[in-house]
Protein backbone atom coordinates (compact mmCIF):
# COMPACT_ATOMS: atom_id res chain seq x y z
CA UNK A 1 0.00 0.00 0.00
CA UNK A 2 2.85 2.41 0.82
CA UNK A 3 4.29 1.86 -2.65
CA UNK A 4 1.01 2.87 -4.29
CA UNK A 5 0.63 5.85 -1.98
CA UNK A 6 4.08 6.97 -3.11
CA UNK A 7 3.08 6.60 -6.75
CA UNK A 8 -0.03 8.66 -6.06
CA UNK A 9 2.02 11.43 -4.47
CA UNK A 10 4.33 11.36 -7.50
CA UNK A 11 1.39 11.70 -9.89
CA UNK A 12 -0.03 14.62 -7.94
CA UNK A 13 3.34 16.38 -7.88
CA UNK A 14 4.26 15.89 -4.22
CA UNK A 15 7.65 14.33 -4.90
CA UNK A 16 8.90 15.05 -1.39
CA UNK A 17 6.27 12.84 0.25
CA UNK A 18 6.67 10.23 -2.46
CA UNK A 19 10.44 10.16 -1.97
CA UNK A 20 10.00 9.79 1.78
CA UNK A 21 7.66 6.82 1.33
CA UNK A 22 10.00 5.10 -1.12
CA UNK A 23 12.95 5.68 1.20
CA UNK A 24 10.90 4.20 4.06
CA UNK A 25 10.25 1.07 1.98
CA UNK A 26 13.95 0.67 1.31
CA UNK A 27 14.84 1.16 4.98
CA UNK A 28 12.17 -1.29 6.11
CA UNK A 29 13.57 -3.87 3.71
CA UNK A 30 17.05 -3.35 5.13
CA UNK A 31 15.70 -3.78 8.67
CA UNK A 32 14.08 -7.07 7.63
CA UNK A 33 17.41 -8.32 6.29
CA UNK A 34 19.18 -7.21 9.46
CA UNK A 35 16.61 -8.99 11.63
CA UNK A 36 16.94 -12.15 9.53
CA UNK A 37 20.73 -12.09 9.90
CA UNK A 38 20.33 -12.16 13.69
CA UNK A 39 17.94 -15.13 13.72
CA UNK A 40 19.34 -18.44 14.96
CA UNK A 41 20.33 -21.14 12.49
CA UNK A 42 19.29 -23.94 14.81
CA UNK A 43 17.60 -26.09 12.17
CA UNK A 44 14.10 -25.46 13.54
CA UNK A 45 11.63 -25.36 10.66
CA UNK A 46 9.81 -22.41 12.22
CA UNK A 47 13.00 -20.33 12.28
CA UNK A 48 14.02 -21.39 8.77
CA UNK A 49 10.66 -20.37 7.28
CA UNK A 50 10.53 -17.07 9.15
CA UNK A 51 14.08 -16.24 8.14
CA UNK A 52 13.38 -17.08 4.49
CA UNK A 53 10.27 -14.91 4.50
CA UNK A 54 12.08 -11.99 6.13
CA UNK A 55 14.92 -12.14 3.61
CA UNK A 56 12.61 -12.44 0.59
CA UNK A 57 10.36 -9.63 1.85
CA UNK A 58 13.37 -7.49 2.71
CA UNK A 59 14.66 -7.63 -0.86
CA UNK A 60 11.14 -7.08 -2.23
CA UNK A 61 10.50 -3.98 -0.13
CA UNK A 62 13.84 -2.52 -1.14
CA UNK A 63 12.96 -3.23 -4.78
CA UNK A 64 9.68 -1.35 -4.45
CA UNK A 65 11.52 1.64 -3.02
CA UNK A 66 13.97 1.54 -5.93
CA UNK A 67 11.17 1.24 -8.51
CA UNK A 68 9.50 4.29 -6.99
CA UNK A 69 12.71 6.28 -7.28
CA UNK A 70 13.29 5.12 -10.85
CA UNK A 71 16.31 2.90 -10.11
CA UNK A 72 15.11 0.05 -12.29
CA UNK A 73 18.39 -1.87 -12.57
CA UNK A 74 18.83 -1.90 -8.83
CA UNK A 75 15.18 -2.90 -8.38
CA UNK A 76 15.61 -5.73 -10.86
CA UNK A 77 18.60 -7.13 -9.00
CA UNK A 78 16.72 -6.95 -5.69
CA UNK A 79 13.70 -8.67 -7.22
CA UNK A 80 15.95 -11.45 -8.51
CA UNK A 81 17.46 -11.87 -5.04
CA UNK A 82 13.98 -12.07 -3.54
CA UNK A 83 12.91 -14.65 -6.10
CA UNK A 84 16.05 -16.71 -5.47
CA UNK A 85 15.08 -16.95 -1.80
CA UNK A 86 11.37 -17.63 -2.36
CA UNK A 87 10.08 -18.31 -5.87
CA UNK A 88 6.35 -18.23 -5.10
CA UNK A 89 5.81 -14.57 -4.26
CA UNK A 90 3.20 -13.45 -6.79
CA UNK A 91 4.11 -9.75 -6.60
CA UNK A 92 7.85 -10.34 -6.91
CA UNK A 93 7.18 -12.41 -10.00
CA UNK A 94 4.82 -9.74 -11.37
CA UNK A 95 7.32 -6.90 -11.02
CA UNK A 96 10.18 -9.06 -12.19
CA UNK A 97 8.19 -9.76 -15.35
CA UNK A 98 7.75 -6.03 -15.89
CA UNK A 99 11.35 -5.01 -15.28
CA UNK A 100 13.47 -8.00 -16.27
CA UNK A 101 14.04 -6.77 -19.84
CA UNK A 102 14.35 -3.08 -18.94
CA UNK A 103 16.96 -3.71 -16.29
CA UNK A 104 18.83 -6.27 -18.40
CA UNK A 105 19.41 -8.33 -15.29
CA UNK A 106 19.52 -11.76 -16.84
Image: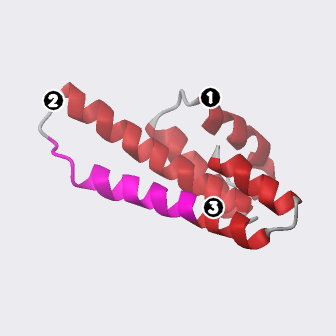
Q: Which residue sits at x=11%, y=38%?
A: 42
- Would you say the residues marked 1 and 2 are in contact, meaning their CB atoms lie under 8 Å apart? no
Q: Nearer the viewer, residue 69 or 43?
A: 69
Inter-mark Cα distance, 1 to 2:
26 Å
What crowding class fits label 2: few (fewer than 14 Cα within 10 Å), some (14-19), or many (20 or more)?
A: few
**Mark sitting earlier along the chain (2/3):** 3
Q: Tell me residue 98's x, y (percent).
A: 78, 42
Q: Which mark is drawn over residue 90?
A: 1
Write down the residue under mark 2: 44
Q: Which mark is drawn over residue 32?
A: none
Pick the quarter of the image with the N terminus.
Answer: top right
Q: Secondary structure at mark 3?
A: helix
Question: In which image quadrant can residue 7 be found?
Answer: bottom right
Q: Tell me residue 41's x, y (percent).
A: 16, 43
Question: In which image quadrant can residue 67 be found?
Answer: bottom right
| Chain part drawn in magenta | 24-41
Inter-mark Cα distance, 2 to 3:
35 Å
**Looking at the image, can residue 106 be seen?**
no
Q: Which residue sits at x=21%, y=47%?
A: 39
List the single residue furthest toward the left.
42
Q: Secondary structure at mark 1?
A: helix
Left or right: residue 45 compared with residue 61: left
Write down the residue under mark 3: 21
Q: Which residue sits at x=55%, y=62%?
A: 24
Left or right: residue 13 compared with residue 89: right
**Looking at the image, can residue 20 be seen?**
yes
Q: Nearer the viewer, residue 50 or 75?
A: 50
Q: Main secondary structure of the magenta part?
A: helix
Q: Nearer the viewer, mark 2 or mark 3?
A: 3
**Mark sitting earlier along the chain (1/2):** 2
Amino acid sequence: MIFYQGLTYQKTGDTTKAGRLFADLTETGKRYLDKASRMPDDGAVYNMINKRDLVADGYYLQALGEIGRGNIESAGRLLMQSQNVYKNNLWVNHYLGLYRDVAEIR
